[in-house]
Image (cartoon, rainbow, N blue to C red):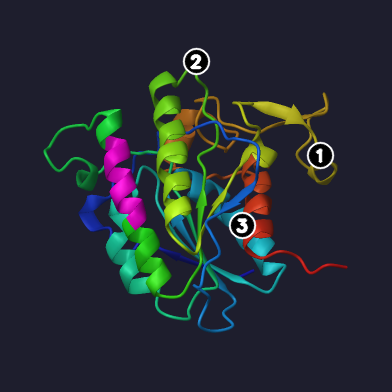
């Protein structure tokens, strides 16, 4: 198993907060921009993962899935962060020809200083506006380095426990990621609905490859009971661990499998 973990270039701009919003996902799994002329400049076997706590929780499972396909994952993840926290890191790390793909996972956080330039918590509309600018900037930067970009649409959040955040993340997916994918070549969105459901679903029937996680009643827990995350432990424990999931997690496993299949499809048999 090969995994490179980095939190470089974040410094004091990062918060350890792990609470964040998410969204429901429309039906299709992959949505691409018009045909792109952007291609990797070398036969790279490395994939970069950039993101917040959802990315962090899926990181180890994604490492395993990619390792099975001969790929190395470089992870740049920290709970509570936003695209603006990682701009300098992406600029330094995503060099021409180094990566076959860059996967980006942010669900609408607004906790760190770069999201609060006026020293106040931004409104949902202000958050979406800044995400639109920052996400387009990241996509253009990565495109210039010759790597395809995959934005993971935020998974559906619990609209009862997290009403504002669920709406905010829905806007991030609909109004930011999909819009940028339509306008920027080399950008694809990955819809998590086939892994986690199009609407919030805390538990689900076990799948054939989940026997090790399956409860006696034939179900697996997909989500944290905070209505946000994908690690099946107490939310306070998860927050104390800065979103490092210490147990096998069906939600993280499913999401990682979906991402791996999108980014590095298995050869046809």
Q: Which residue is mark 1?
A: 207
Compared with 93, 133 (above or below) is: above
Pick whichever of labels 1 and 3 is earlier in the sequence: 3
Looking at the image, the residue that sits furthest to the front is 34
Compared with 36, 58 (above or below) is: above
Q: Residues within 10 Å of mark 2 (few under 14, many from 20)?
A: few
Per the model, the C-alpha gap separating discs 1 and 3 is: 18 Å
Pick whichever of labels 3 and 2 is earlier in the sequence: 3
What residue do we see at 43% from left, 26% from top?
Answer: 167
Q: Which residues are magenta?
A: 127-136
Per the model, the C-alpha gap separating discs 3 and 2 is: 30 Å
Disc ID at residue 160: 2
Considering depth in this image, is 163 or 232 the residue closer to the camera?
A: 163
Looking at the image, the residue that sits furthest to the right is 269
Identify the secondary structure beneath mark 2: loop
Q: Are marks 1 and 3 in contact (CB under 8 Å)?
A: no
Q: Which residue is mark 3?
A: 62
Identify the secondary structure beneath mark 1: loop
Per the model, the C-alpha gap separating discs 1 and 2 is: 27 Å
Q: Where is residue 181 shown, x and y percent of the image?
A: 47, 53
**Would you say the magenta stretch is mainly helix, strand or loop?**
helix
Q: What is the quadrant of the C terminus in the image?
A: bottom right
Considering depth in this image, is 14 or 148 the residue closer to the camera?
A: 148
What residue do we see at 68% from left, 45% from top?
Answer: 254
What residue do we see at 48% from left, 71% from top?
Answer: 147
| Position of residue 183 in the picture relative to residue 214 (left or right) | left
Q: Are marks 3 and 2 in contact (CB under 8 Å)?
A: no
């Amino acid at each position: 198993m090969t995994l490179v973990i980095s939190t470089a270039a974040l410094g004091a701009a990062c918060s350890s907060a792990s609470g964040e919003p998410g969204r429901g996902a429309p039906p299709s799994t992959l949505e691409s921009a018009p045909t792109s002329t952007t291609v990797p400049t070398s036969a790279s076997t490395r994939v970069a993962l950039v993101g917040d706590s959802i990315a962090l929780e899926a990181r180890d499972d994604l490492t395993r899935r990619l390792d099975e396909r001969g790929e190395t994952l470089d992870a740049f993840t920290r709970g509570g962060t936003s695209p603006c926290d990682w701009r300098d890191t992406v600029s330094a790390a995503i060099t021409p020809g180094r990566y076959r793909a860059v996967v980006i996972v942010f669900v609408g956080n607004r906790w760190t200083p770069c999201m609060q330039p006026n020293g106040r918590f931004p409104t949902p509309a202000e958050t979406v506006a800044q995400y639109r600018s920052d996400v387009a900037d990241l996509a253009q930067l990565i495109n210039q380095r010759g790597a395809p970009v995959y934005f993971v649409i935020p998974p559906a959040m619990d609209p009862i426990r997290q009403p504002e955040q669920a709406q905010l993340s829905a806007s991030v997916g609909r109004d930011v990621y999909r819009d940028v994918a339509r306008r920027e070549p080399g950008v694809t969105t990955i819809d998590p609905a086939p892994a986690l459901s199009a609407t919030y679903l805390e538990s689900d029937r076990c799948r054939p490859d989940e026997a090790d996680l399956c409860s006696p009643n034939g179900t697996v827990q997909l989500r944290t009971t905070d209505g946000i995350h994908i690690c099946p432990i107490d939310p306070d424990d998860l927050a104390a661990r800065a979103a490092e999931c210490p147990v096998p997690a069906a939600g993280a496993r499913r999401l990682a499998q979906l991402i791996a299949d999108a980014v590095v499809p298995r050869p046809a048999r």
